[in-house]
Amino acid sequence: MSIVVFHNAFGDHMNFVAQVMTDSMDVAYRLTNSIDNPWFINDNKEEIVVFSKNEIKGIRSTSIGDIMIDLSTNTMYIVASFGFDQLELDTVVKYYEVNDSGDTIYMEDTAEVLYRKAIQSMIDSSVRKGVSSRM
């Protein structure tokens, strides 16, 4: 029961920013949006958000064009003008990753490959100290 959130950066690349412990796309969207305070430092205790190794600096609210993966159904969605549109696994997605040296690496893969990388990123994040934050 969790949803992984990728933000669209630089117009055509994705960046893994959070894992929200919920089975609701609407809740994950709401919890990754800043209203009165930045979403990553608010006091909401409903779900847990786990950040990737990427720095908090530059994280913004989830918006149109961002990708969310529902891990309970193994389904990927893109945030649309109204709601979420399902992505087929063969859809090509451009995104970026920041390596341990801080270098930005631009990637292009199918949604299925991005899904597998998202799971690996979550596994990697869970074993590093200091990357989890209670919301």
Image (spheres, rainbow, N blue to C red):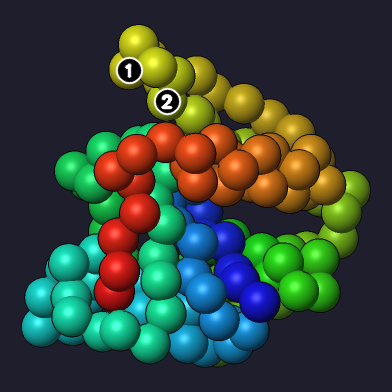
Q: Are marks 2 and 1 in contact (CB under 8 Å)?
A: yes
State the CA–CA distance, disc 2 to disc 1: 6 Å
Would you place residue 85 above or below residue 107 in this image? below
Alpha-carbon neighbours of circle 2 within 10 Å: few (<14), some, or many (≥20)? some
At 42% from the left and 57% from the top, the residue drawn is: 50
Residue 55 appearing in the image? yes
Residue 102 image label: 1
Q: Whole-percent x and y of residue 115?
A: 73, 49
At 19% from the left and 43% from the top, the residue drawn is: 57
The amino acid at mark 1 is Gly
The amino acid at mark 2 is Val
Would you place residue 112 above or below residue 50 in this image? above
Total marks shown come to 2
**73 or 68: nearer the viewer:** 73
At 63% from the left and 84% from the top, the residue drawn is: 23
Alpha-carbon neighbours of circle 1 within 10 Å: few (<14), some, or many (≥20)? few
Q: Is residue 121 left or right of residue 60?
A: right
Q: Which residue is mark 2?
A: 98
Residue 5 image label: none
Q: Whole-percent x and y of residue 90?
A: 89, 48
